[in-house]
Amino acid sequence: MASSSDSVVQRLKLVKNMIQLGETSSLDDQAGRLRKVNEKSDGPLEGIATALSEERYSDAVSRIDEFLQSEAAVQKYVDPRLSALRLEAESLEERISELESEKAEIEREIHEFNLRHEQELGPILREILEIQAERKRKKAEKNPEDDRAQAQAEEAEEEYEQYSRAVEEAQEEERIDLTEEEEEKLNKLHRQASKQCHPDMVEEDQQEVAEEVFVELQDAYERNDLDEVERIADRVETGLAFGTRSKEIDEVEKLETEVERLRKQAEELEAEIEALRSSDSYQKLSEVENLDEYFERQKTRLEDELERLRQEEPSSVQS
């Protein structure tokens, strides 16, 4: 069976046009090219090539028309819904990529704000909680029959211990401060890389590798590690070739299922972003115009509060 590729069809159309125009000087060369792509010596292309070599041009044209008609007759039917669904899937994938980037940027901003809060203000606030917990404990010891005092003491102690662990973890984490230009580059690289390696959008046999790369990318992005994000982005761009899942689906029913999955994922991401924007941390962050001034004011306020507690008579808060 001769090749039915588009190149063969186009070559045969070219040969037919050359005959009709009377340009026969290179037809022997075209006959040779047809023989090279012919798989069987007695196949249709061989018959066309022989007719050309023997200058039986009318026979060659008839054979070409017959071949082109047979090729058109066996063309696979493609459901027109397939292209529409694929376009919809690609649009949803693009939307999901944008939402993922938006979510990641909000999470990074919240993490950075909370980390700075614990690193700069945490030690002071921890000491305040320690003093408050100690006083409530002493009050509970003096009033062993007071259930409310016992509960308040336990709650204060638990709050102090939990916050102490959070402050210790924050002190161990390195905070990387970026310039405005570096932050813009970080966001751009993250958007590009996350779009290419998101595990929910790559082919199924690539999901495991994509998941590992995506987790590394998100972790580096949250830490403001521009060098690491750039390294991962370069690896995704040049060393890994992730295919898009929707482009590999050629059945309407399966693509409909994929479109529905993508639509649901986009809706879930929108809800998650709304929840993040409504969180106390993000609301507070959104209200701050100058972070340096904000943390300086908070530090002064907490230091004053700590000094007040140190000077306050324990008996005055235990009654």
Image (tube, rainbow, N blue to C red):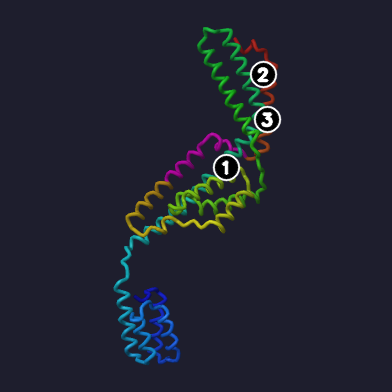
Can the viewer see residue 98? Answer: no
Q: Earlier in the sequence, mark 2 or mark 1?
A: 1
47 to the left or right of 281: left
At 53% from the left and 13% from the top, the residue drawn is: 150
Is 280 part of what is drawn in magenta?
yes
Mark 3 vs mark 1: give the one in front.
1
Q: Position of residue 65 (x, y in %)?
A: 32, 82
Image point 63% across, 40% down: which residue?
A: 289
Q: Quadrant of residue 82?
A: bottom left
Element type where label 2 sits in the image: helix
| Residue that carries the numbered disc 1 in the rendered image | 108
Q: Residue at x 37, y 74 (%)?
A: 4
As drawn, 242 above or below 314: below
Amino acid bearing label 3: Lys
Residue holding disc 2: 309
In the image, 40 versus 128, the foreground residue is: 40
SS category of the residue bearing label 1: helix
Residue 272: give x, y in percent of width and height: 47, 41
Q: Which residues are magenta?
A: 267-288
